[in-house]
Image: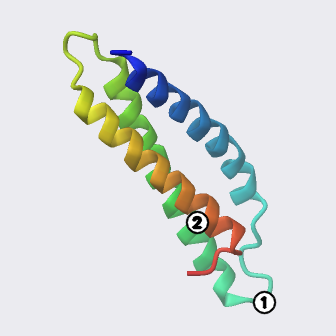
Amino acid sequence: ADVEFLKTANQQLVECRRVLKYTYAFAYYMPLDMGDPDNKAKKERFEYHQEMLERFTENLSELCEKPLAEMDRTDVVNQTRVVKNFLDNVLRYVDEGLED
């Protein structure tokens, strides 16, 4: 029970990396212009969200890799929550057609 937070954090890391894997292909195939000047802005916003998800995921990964004696449970729990919320927002953003 003492390390349940670590299991949750690692499950979140797996989910984030799975989603990130697909975002690279999604971004690659996004139309850049195609007569719609908003497409470039949408792609830039999407890539910004993708980069932020990468950063949050890496921050959580670094926290989880620390030895248990040096690990701060509160930091891991908080970062897990931040990553989950951001991931949910990115998925909602894509689901809604990349609209603000």
Q: Which amino acid, by three-letter code, is at mark 2? A: Phe
| The image quarter in which residue 32 lies | bottom right
Counting from the top left corner in percent of width and height, residue 52 is at 44, 54
Quarter of the rendering occupied by the N terminus: top left
Foreground: 37 or 22?
A: 22
Quarter of the rendering occupied by the C terminus: bottom right
Foreground: 48 or 18?
A: 18
Using residue 31 as the reference point, say whether residue 53 is left or right of it.
left
Q: Report the residue at 58% width, 65% height from top.
A: 46
Foreground: 7 or 60?
A: 7
Mark sitting on residue 46: 2
How many dots with numbers? Answer: 2
Q: Report the residue at 61% width, 37% height from top.
A: 15
Q: CA distance from mark 2 to mark 1?
A: 19 Å
Using residue 42 as the reference point, say whether residue 9 is left or right of it.
left
Residue to which mark 1 is pinned: 35
Counting from the top left corner in percent of width and height, residue 87 is at 53, 52
* Within-10-Å neighbours for mark 2: few <14, some 14–19, many 20+: many
